[in-house]
Image (tube, coloured by chain):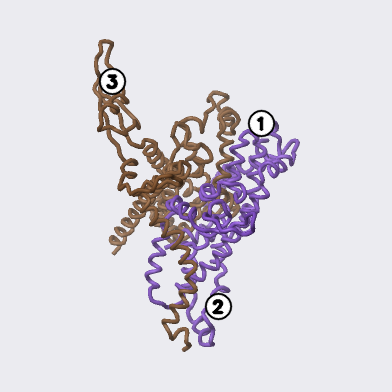
Chain colours: A brown, B purple
Amino acid sequence: MTEWTASRGRGRFTALIFGGPALAGLAIFLVLPFLMALALTFTNQRLVSPQATEFVGLRNYERLLSVTALVQAPVDDGAGPVWPRVRDVTRADPAYAGYRPLTGFSLGTRRVTILAKDPAFLRALLNTFVFALLVVPLQCVAALGLALLVDAGLKGQTVFRAICFSPVVMSMVIVSVIWSFLFDRDLGLFNKALGMVSFGLIEPVDWLGDPRTAMPAIVIMSAWQGAGFQMLILLAGLQGISQELYDAARIDGANAVQRFRHITLPGLRQTIVFVLIVTTIAALGLFTQVDVMTGGGPRGSTGTVMFEAVQRGVREENISYGATIALIYFALITCVILLQQLWLRRRARRAA
Amino acid sequence: MTPTQRKTIPLRIALYALMACVALVFLFPFLFMLASSFKTNDQIFADLESMRALLPVGPLTGDNYARAFRLGNIGHYLFNSVLVTGITVALGLLVNSLAAFALARLEWRGKQAVLTLLVVLLVVPFEAISVPLMVLVASLPGLAIGANGIEITHSWLDTLYVQIVPFIANAFSIYLFYQFFRDIPKDLDEAAYVDGATPLQVYRHVIVPSSMPVFATVTILQGLAMWNQYLWPLITVPGEAARPLMVGMEQFFGARKTAWGEVMAYAALITIPVLAAFVFFQRWFVRSVVGSGVKG
């Protein structure tokens, strides 16, 4: 036996030299900023400020997450029922200090206004959830369809697989730019095509300029860009399912739908869960598309958590506030991963 | 792979037709980009009503490319992006594979703890730490070439190395290397150690030569991530000198929204190298993505 394997102390020294640079890099550029983020959220630090940084406790979190509701009964002034202006009420009542309206609805004759200290952020949080809820199922179902099509054993499947995957290697910036043209109200290919198939009956849609269509437009583009990735992962899962199962099912007279339900789906379950998790995490981090295509607009309809983090933290130079938003994003991701772990544990217990 | 048995002719035709339609859905934005990049704006708009929009037909011109180079400063940004991507990937391969070697092939106390920490770090997305990381690099001492030669500065912002140094060490790369190295038979290095080899020699002559697939995987994944990086340079590189391509693209698009041909030429120039690499190394790309996806 040589000195290298014989001596553990020597091994540790060598390991330190080999692993040192990478571990130091991770410590400085990953662990340290994460700890800094935690610390920053309790301060009021700005990028450049004449004032010294102060400890402000939970104020950042409080401002981000405070929500309350204002319920107003109508007042009859003779000319019919009237509701007092929200701004007059919140100004007069110190309990509503710092609150601004987020959204409102009617409840019988009462009018309910949801107030928040930072309505833009809560709007962005909701937008992020909406984006994830729309894009994850769309992208994963599309990816499963693509994977089945590639796996159908037709000629040209390698080329087809490459074509479906090619948007994944493209930068999201480029994809966003090209699609901005496609979505153009007057000259975009989508409106041209819609107009043509409907013989001019469908009015041109201002895809990215209308608060109702901007987020769905980003959803469609994002699913198009990303589906090839999930397709590859699902394809690997599909090819791991034993062919004998299908052959046996065929002998028993199972049709294609039954084979899909009882062999393909159960065989893919673990892969599907993995794909769902990865897609959800990516969806919750939505930033580039919004930054390039809409800048969070129109009227806040496409602002997202990460977009707000950059907006407040970097562009408005409110570092501590931006760091708090980024940390809330991290908390969301952690919840998703914990859910996955719970699911895996439950499954393992059931199997045991 | 599913055998092709028992597919009737009509079903096969239907599936091929479906495949062709889906392929067109994935291809048409590229085709539109490429075709438009060779046309004048008037030509692009005139062609929108028909399939000509996706085809390079009619009077074609290279003017858009010339203008993208002249107005969009592409040459300079391209140089920055190539430099940043190349250096980060090269140093990353070395540093991360060495660390993985220490984790997978050397015995030392504390190894298990480091491995556990590494797995925890895998789930921290870059976005979550980008803002505090910017604060950190904004106050690190750096070097710059100024009027009086090399000067010491008090910030990394607006440099090339702010786009390189933080990304060399990468938890996911280490993990990919680690998984691969772990499965190489141990007798190989034992034999080398008996012959008096040092760990560095074992790394160079035993581990690296038998690990080409994982080196290719890490090169592709890291290279793509670096080439396509947007958020980080957007917040740390406000000036033009160190600006990479993607930020340049966004600025060019913002400034010349109506010059479709020029913007498309710009986009095509950035995309073609990546697509060419993808077409040539398709097998490796696919393997990398599947390998990265089936982790843990």
Q: Horizontal and vertical percent for residue B218?
A: 54, 62
Residue pushed farthest top?
A78
Q: Residue at 67% of width from left, 45% of height from top?
A: B73
In x, y percent, where is residue B270?
Answer: 63, 48
Element carrying mark 2 = helix
Compute the Cα span from label 2 to label 3: 80 Å
User: Looking at the picture, which amino acid does disc 2 mark?
Assistant: Val
Residue type, mark 1 in image: Phe
Spot the residue most to the bottom. A1
Task: Give the percent coordinates (x, y) of residue A207.
Answer: 51, 32
From the viewer's perspective, is the residue at label 2 or at label 3 nearer?
3
A163 to B172, vertically: above or below: above
Q: Image height check: is B181 above or below B241?
A: below
**Mark 1 on the same chain as mark 3:** no
Mark 1 crowdedness (10 Å alpha carbons): few <14, some 14-19, many ≥20:
some
Q: Is residue A332 visible?
A: no
For the residues marked 1 and 3, what is the alpha-carbon distance in whole angstroms?
51 Å
- What's the amino acid at mark 3? Trp
Assess whether mark 3 and mark 2 are in contact (beta carbons under 8 angstroms).
no
In depth, the one of A338 and B100 nearer the eye is B100
Which label is found at residue B206? 2
Identify residue for label 1.
B45
Residues at marks 2 and 1, CA–CA distance in whole angstroms: 60 Å
Q: Residue A83's mark?
A: 3
**Mark 1 vs mark 3: in front:** 3
> How many callouts does the rendering have?
3
**Image coords of residue B151 (percent x, y):** 59, 58
The chain letter for the residue carrying disc 3 is A
- Pinpoint the chain carrying mark 1: B
Whether pointer 2 and pointer 1 mark residues with C-beta atoms closer than 8 Å, the reply is no
- Helix or strand or loop: what does disc 1 sit on? helix
